[in-house]
Image: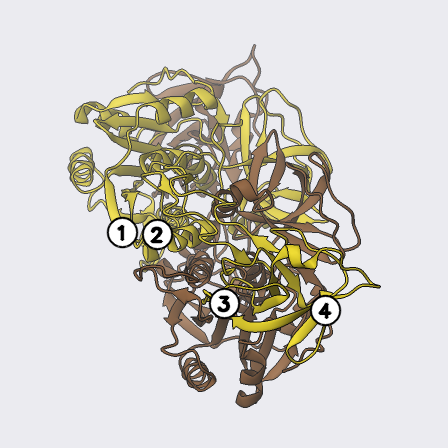
Chain colours: A brown, B yellow
Amino acid sequence: MNLNRTPIAVSEAVRRVISGLSKLPVETIPYTESYGRILARDLEASMDVPRFNKSAMDGFAIRAKDSEGASGENRVSFEVVAEVPAGATSRYELSEGEAFRIMTGASIPESADAVVMFEQTRQDERSFSIRKPFTSGENIARQGEECRSGDVIVPAGTLINPGTVAALATFGYKEIEVRKQPVVGILATGSELVDIDVPLEAGKIRNSNGPMVRSQLQRMNIEARMYALEADDFDTLLQRVKQMLNEVDAVITTGGVSVGDYDHLPKLYESLGAKELFNKVGMRPGSVTTVSMLGSKPMFGLSGNPSACYTGFELFARPALLKMMGHDRIFAPVLDAVLDGDFKKANPFTRFIRAEIDYREGLIYASPAGFNKSNAVTSIAKSNGIIVLPGGTRGYEKGDAIKVMMTDMTSGIDHFDI
Amino acid sequence: MNLNRTPIAVSEAVRRVISGLSKLPVETIPYTESYGRILARDLEASMDVPRFNKSAMDGFAIRAKDSEGASGENRVSFEVVAEVPAGATSRYELSEGEAFRIMTGASIPESADAVVMFEQTRQDERSFSIRKPFTSGENIARQGEECRSGDVIVPAGTLINPGTVAALATFGYKEIEVRKQPVVGILATGSELVDIDVPLEAGKIRNSNGPMVRSQLQRMNIEARMYALEADDFDTLLQRVKQMLNEVDAVITTGGVSVGDYDHLPKLYESLGAKELFNKVGMRPGSVTTVSMLGSKPMFGLSGNPSACYTGFELFARPALLKMMGHDRIFAPVLDAVLDGDFKKANPFTRFIRAEIDYREGLIYASPAGFNKSNAVTSIAKSNGIIVLPGGTRGYEKGDAIKVMMTDMTSGIDHFDI
């Protein structure tokens, strides 16, 4: 057993994990199923937007030149010769003093070049008058002014959000190419763990890390497969992980990475021929987090400590999986926040504390979860972010400025900001 | 047709929508499917946590009194009589100078009351010595110190996040009661709209609002049903919406709410006997957003303008649906941000602008999407938040302090903060 672990900086650990990963293959899916996926190809405009000169207002389409000289004292009148509803157009050629009644979004007939809003007119049954001149193009959205056919609208690597789906629909992309989603296997190790429906005997606890990590994956829209050990010996573990490596794109184990006597993971990696990227990180909790690679498949050895497990997933597994999915913004935003409770411990290493995040008057407030033992379980069960305290700092007090890693957002940033 | 619409304040509009809604029924689901759902009952601790006195460290369990007087000059020695791995305990009764080797998480045997960390000892094969006295309880996590059986861990109305799932697992809740998710029907109206696979003729555009709203619902884990009109007349519309009201919990229509001649929704609500909550809101865009109620079912008449449609959904439909789901934090956080581009228009009414949000050095930056026509389509396709500019303000410049409604977070706040 390797007890001489050398801790590396969190940022270096993240760099090692990310740098060795490749993107999963591309697949074609209906655009209706694309929300939350990652674009594998640039999305190009398939036409000009607007596709035709269209009315930006409900009103009357006129020839601008016919409005010359209009004023309050010299109202200019127009006769309404036809209507152009949205979804239609007209080939009628306007003569001087003629106008179309036109609705927002309707195609401007060729002979018109300005739109007068209803509110700018005094109307009779089939005519109206105006008190100001209009310039060519007024209240018209010009063909191609928002984008030209062939423009890259959304680059490959972007998470498809509702606005992106609207763009896919606008440009007629019924099917699109996205990266495959990884399938992730979860194996909770530890002889103290029992399943949820087993009565608890002395010394046993229920497996909560496995379900927690599965939920962290669900939050990313990633399918998890749960695995279990029928016996707590090395050969069983080895066979199970080999099976997982055949069936999934990434393996997450929880527990089994401390220096305790009953921990097998380092030996496991060795037996598999996996490349250990690191086995100790300069952070608390989770210093004994281990990540290794077997070929292109990452294996995350997260701590059995629930907070370390949660943080280890968000720090290492989340960006790694997003990189495999082809995402170009794989890191969670780290934002300024106000500490909403005391945290008196010194921080010899970078410290990550699960937190209950609240929002008041535009600011983010973060209460450290699990620090006050009397409400540890409650605060952890409600935590929705991670406080990041730099190494080398002393205790913090309520009201201090701190940083929070936002773990419940779909948006991300393109660099590790800790 | 009612052209005399009286605008009401956004906050009043939201209040009217929210106040009339009731919660959907409760259903029981496996805890493995609970991520993202809303707890319908308080989650109570089913046992003390920790459930037993357990070791907080890897080391040796001793009787504290045996360590009295230990110092660098007067090391006290112990004999290791047994091992207690995690998941086990021991009934052996320690005598003076005896110790258990014990792993983190293991149950402290009754006769021990302190744990010495490995790092605090000098070890021989079957014994070790220490250079300081230990107090009773040192390095021991005491039964019930984090919570007591019966404590409310997470109150009803809370969104189930990964930490909540861990709590469900810890306390053995294999099934839990949550509120049903609403089923929402979407109907895009407008004779200019065609489906994604129909070639575009002059004056036509593809239906992008329908797919966009469906994605906004997917982001909330809500099932959407798409409806269409086979003809653009009032009777077809009326029959289709009646059908929707039979099949779904809430109806969202897009388009058909302006003062244009071809708009039918106000008459529709009247024919259905629905109660109109408002038909004009003091905001831009989306001033003609309409919400009405038929019994307990809300009908959201969102604008056909894509930005107004997007914002109308987030402002009105999202909190309404979350209220129906029993959520107690139904509003999106509104956070301080830095404007990352000029926005020179005056704002006679509260203005909502879709925005590309970025995060740099702890701050939130928001670029108004769709304002510069030359990249309108791109910026809208990538937008992931909404800038909120108060009514009565002048143009804003890059670098100005503004507020952003965060639309891509699962966390929320319990009051409308605009």
- What mark, if any, has residue B160 been given in the picture? none
- Residue placed under numbered mark 3 in the picture: B86
Badge 1 vs badge 2, beta-carbon distance below 8 Å: yes
Q: Is residue A203 above or below residue A99?
A: below
Which residue is labeled 1 in the image? B29
- Cα distance, mark 4 to mark 1? 54 Å
Q: Which chain carries label 1?
A: B
Q: Earlier in the sequence, mark 3 or mark 4?
A: 3
Crowding near the residue tagged with mark 3, few <14, some 14–19, many ≥20 C-alpha atoms within 10 Å: many
In the picture of the structure, the residue carrying the numbered disc 4 is: B129
Residue B82 placement, left or right of B138: left
Whole-number angstrom distance, CA of label 2 to CA of label 3? 29 Å
Report how far apart the C-alphas of labels 1 and 2 lie in the structure.
7 Å
Quadrant of the image occupied by residue B351:
top right
Mark 4, chain letter? B
Name the residue that disc number 2 marks.
Answer: B34
Callouts 1 and 2 in the same chain:
yes
Q: What residue type is labelled 4?
A: Ser
In this view of the protein, which residue sits in the foreground, B5 or A333?
Answer: A333
Residue lying at 36% horizontally and 27% vertically, measured from the top left: B18
Residue B233 place in picture, x, y as percent: 20, 36
> Along the polypeptide, which appears first: circle 2 or circle 3?
2
Mark with earlier residue (1, 3): 1
Which dot, 2 or 3, sits closer to the camera?
Answer: 3
Kind of residue at disc 3:
Ala
Looking at the rendered structure, whether the residues under marks 2 and 4 are on a common chain is answered as yes
